[in-house]
């Protein structure tokens, strides 16, 4: 009956209780959704680090890590190949020849890492080939006499291979998008004009539009008017193994865009045998080995990798064998920090809510002074009085929490499929994916519930004290 | 007749403020089983304090209160709570029913504290409400009842725990004359037919008229 009374007491002043419930609901939904966004961001970065950039394990010559010297390489021989092919933990592996150089187009130049890859082996370890922008070519798939290079969207932008042009097709798309007819007419005045980079397109748009229209239309004009100059020839210069300057000319066969702008800004890919020939590096010398671990060994748990890391250390004694903890330190640290940070944030939200709950409950108790005196007089024990007030606080808190959790689950489910585009330009600048796919963990929900229960318990202490203080003035 | 309540040299001094208040002054009193006793006196004479002391709600400064042969002075808070729950019925001036419960649930409430099985307490509550003439208002909440009806629910609630006696603090103070008469008739009937002991404080001449014993308090002391 005590619990039933507590439940009924919650609804005595409906509007007051609903305000608290809505506050708890909003706090819970926001806390869990933010947690899921943070998890989604960090997991996206980790996914990219493992699946696109460096795989589960990366082996690099220790000196190469310090100075990127072309001669600071690893020697791969029959016994090491034999080990990599037969170790039970290893799913696939590939090697990189990695040379720092300069890429030059007809208009501009950029410092890059030229990475020599064995295309088929690479595809078994990294998923870079899935990031080729449709319409920009492919991942070394078509045969051609010229040397092929895959570059990133970011480098294409830097080398002015990524250009902008207003065509009839672009105007049609903009009309379909729902842009105002007057704006379309203005854009039509620059039809056929080619803009070498987004800065030039931006300045043309500024001349066409007022500031508010520019803010409204520029981004969409930029996205629809972009095109890549196909088959562009690029010249690469770098130091060979003999420290002599070497030149390589290649045609862009595909342009990729991953979720990590830092990675994209640095790396271009050519076939291993070509780069090796131009740089004059022996077939047995490589700079990096990327290793993919079988899923059954649960490589996400780094403890499970310690055995294979140790064995690889003996096979490649001059090398540093790195897991994500070392080869993508930022992503790993973020993962480690993100969770406790999230729980602290949830705790802060609930501490703030606790003040509201304490205030509401204290008012409710003070209003029911005579009633509580009566209850104590007729024989309600202190323990039962505490339980009653605790349950009232608990109901006030848990109703909002349950609705908040359910709301958060549905929101996360929706956005996990559709993604959230929030400050994509800024996020990409910091190496995160522009589209965030929130992820909800059971742990996040369980810890939220524990914090809620603790909040309810703590919030009931002050009202209970008020109730105990009043009990002596009876009849 | 056996004394149900024996009060010996009872004193209660409130000394929380600078001025000490001698609320109950050397009271000696015996109340027998089945009495219908009224404690009367002007405001501030110590009526409520005396009832609070008998009900174990506050502790005396000195003296002894013996209920059914056992002293309640010096008992632990937990024991006193249990003692009140099981042996005393309370009727309050302003009814003090739980507004969220129906008349039936208010009557059942103490039995649920006593650990009665739900079906038994439901049956007894229904019988008691019938006895006080509220069989057709069992499912009404206090706000839907008149003052007199609420006080009758309070009587039923006080009887629910099968107490040794009932303490009523000015039970008719908020009632009109019709409700007062109805309530007094019910209390008198319960006293006569079921030998239930009633001790109530009052200012009301109509109540004093019904009482078979009147104890007059002046400045905390009994005036014979």
Image (cartoon, coloured by chain):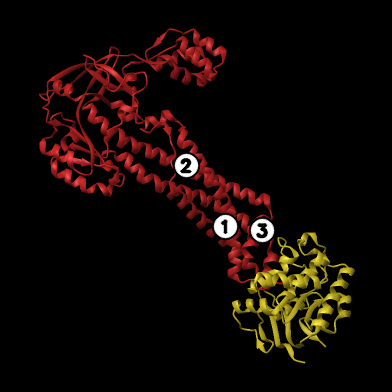
| Residue sticking out furthest to the bottom | B1
Coordinates of residue A289 in the picture (x, y in percent): 20, 35
**Residue corresponding to mark 1:** A394
Q: Alpha-carbon neighbours of circle 3 within 10 Å: few (<14), some, or many (≥20)?
A: some
**Residue corresponding to mark 3:** A8
Q: Are marks 2 and 3 on the same chain?
A: yes
**Residue corresponding to mark 2:** A34
Sequence order check: which comes first, mark 2 or mark 1? 2
| Mark 2 belongs to chain | A
Above or below, B72 against B129 in this view is below
Coordinates of residue A189 in the picture (x, y in percent): 49, 7
C-alpha separation, residue under disc 2 versus residue under disc 3: 33 Å
Give the label on residue A163, or none. none
What is chain A's hue in the picture? Answer: red
> Marks 3 and 1: in contact by CB < 8 Å?
no
Q: Nearer the viewer, residue A29 or A173?
A: A173
- On the question of residue A22 being in view, the answer is yes
Locate residue A418 relative to residue A251 in the image: left or right: right
> Marks 3 and 2: in contact by CB < 8 Å?
no
- On the question of residue B92 being in view, the answer is no
| Mark 3 belongs to chain | A
Q: Secondary structure at mark 2?
A: helix
What is chain B's hue in the picture? Answer: yellow
Above or below, B186 against A348 in this view is below
Locate residue B21 relative to residue A305 in the image: left or right: right
Coordinates of residue B142 in the picture (x, y in percent): 77, 62
Locate residue B186 relative to residue B100 in the image: left or right: right
Sequence order check: which comes first, mark 1 or mark 3? 3
C-alpha separation, residue under disc 2 versus residue under disc 1: 24 Å
């Amino acid at each position: 009956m005590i619990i039933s009374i507590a439940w009924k007491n919650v609804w005595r002043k409906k509007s007051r209780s609903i305000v608290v419930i809505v506050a708890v609901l909003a706090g819970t939904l926001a806390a869990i959704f933010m947690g899921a966004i943070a998890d989604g961001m960090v997991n996206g970065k980790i996914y990219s680090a493992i699946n696109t950039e460096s795989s589960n394990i990366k082996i690099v010559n220790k000196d190469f890590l310090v100075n990127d010297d072309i001669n600071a390489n690893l020697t791969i021989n029959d016994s090491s190949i034999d080990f990599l092919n037969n170790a039970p933990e290893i799913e696939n592996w590939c090697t990189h020849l990695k040379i720092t150089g300069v890429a030059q187009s007809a208009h501009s130049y950029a410092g890059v890492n030229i990475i020599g890859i064995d295309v088929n082996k690479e595809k078994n370890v990294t998923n870079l080939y899935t990031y080729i922008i449709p319409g920009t070519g492919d991942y070394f798939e078509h045969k051609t006499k010229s040397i092929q290079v895959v570059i990133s969207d970011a480098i294409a932008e830097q080398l002015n291979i990524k250009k902008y042009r207003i065509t009839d097709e672009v105007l049609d798309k903009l009309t379909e998008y729902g842009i105002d007819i007057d704006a379309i007419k203005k854009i039509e005045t620059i039809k056929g004009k080619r803009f070498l980079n987004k800065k030039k397109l931006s300045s043309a748009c500024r001349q066409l539009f007022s500031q508010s229209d520019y803010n409204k239309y520029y981004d969409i004009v930029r996205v629809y008017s972009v095109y890549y100059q196909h088959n562009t020839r690029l010249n690469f210069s770098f130091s060979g193994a003999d420290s002599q300057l070497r030149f390589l000319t290649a045609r862009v066969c595909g342009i990729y865009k991953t979720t990590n702008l830092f990675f994209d800004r640095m790396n271009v890919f050519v076939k291993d045998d070509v780069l090796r020939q131009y740089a004059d590096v022996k077939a047995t010398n490589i700079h990096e080995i990327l290793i993919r671990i079988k899923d059954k060994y649960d490589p996400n748990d780094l403890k499970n990798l310690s055995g294979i890391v140790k064995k690889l250390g003996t096979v490649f004694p001059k090398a540093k064998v790195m897991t994500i903890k070392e080869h993508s330190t930022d992503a790993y640290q973020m993962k480690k920090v993100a969770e406790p940070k999230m729980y602290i944030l949830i705790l802060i939200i609930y501490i703030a809510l606790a003040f509201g709950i304490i205030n509401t409950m204290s008012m409710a108790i003070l209003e029911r002074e005579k009633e509580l005196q009566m209850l104590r007089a007729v024989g309600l024990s202190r323990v039962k009085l505490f339980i009653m007030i605790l349950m009232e606080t608990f109901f006030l808190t848990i109703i909002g929490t349950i609705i908040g959790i359910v709301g958060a689950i549905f929101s996360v489910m929706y956005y996990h499929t559709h993604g959230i585009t929030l400050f994509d330009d800024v996020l990409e600048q910091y190496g995160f994916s522009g589209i965030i796919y929130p992820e909800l963990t059971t742990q996040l929900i369980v810890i939220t519930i524990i914090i809620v229960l603790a909040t309810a318990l703590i919030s009931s202490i002050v009202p209970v004290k008020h109730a105990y203080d009043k009990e002596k003035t009876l009849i | 007749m056996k004394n149900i309540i024996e009060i010996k040299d009872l004193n209660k001094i409130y000394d929380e403020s600078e001025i000490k208040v001698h609320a109950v002054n050397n009271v000696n009193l015996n109340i027998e089983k089945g009495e219908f006793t009224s404690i009367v006196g002007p405001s501030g004479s110590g009526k409520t304090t005396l009832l609070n002391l008998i009900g174990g709600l506050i502790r005396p400064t000195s003296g002894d209160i013996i209920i059914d042969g056992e002293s309640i002075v010096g008992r632990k808070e937990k024991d006193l709570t249990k003692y009140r729950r099981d042996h005393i019925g309370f009727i309050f001036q302003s009814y003090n029913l739980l507004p969220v419960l129906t008349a039936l649930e208010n009557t059942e409430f103490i039995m649920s504290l006593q650990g009665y099985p739900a079906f038994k307490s439901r049956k007894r509550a229904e019988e008691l409400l019938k006895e006080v003439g509220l069989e057709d208002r069992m499912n009404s909440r206090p706000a839907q009842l008149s003052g007199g009806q609420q006080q009758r629910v309070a009587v039923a609630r006080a009887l629910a725990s099968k107490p040794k006696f009932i303490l009523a603090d000015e039970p008719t103070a908020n009632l009109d004359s019709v409700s007062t008469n109805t309530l007094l008739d019910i209390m008198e009937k319960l006293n006569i037919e079921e030998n239930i002991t009633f001790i109530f404080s009052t200012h009301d001449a109509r109540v004093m008229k019904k009482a078979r014993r009147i104890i007059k308090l002046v400045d905390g002391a009994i005036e014979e």
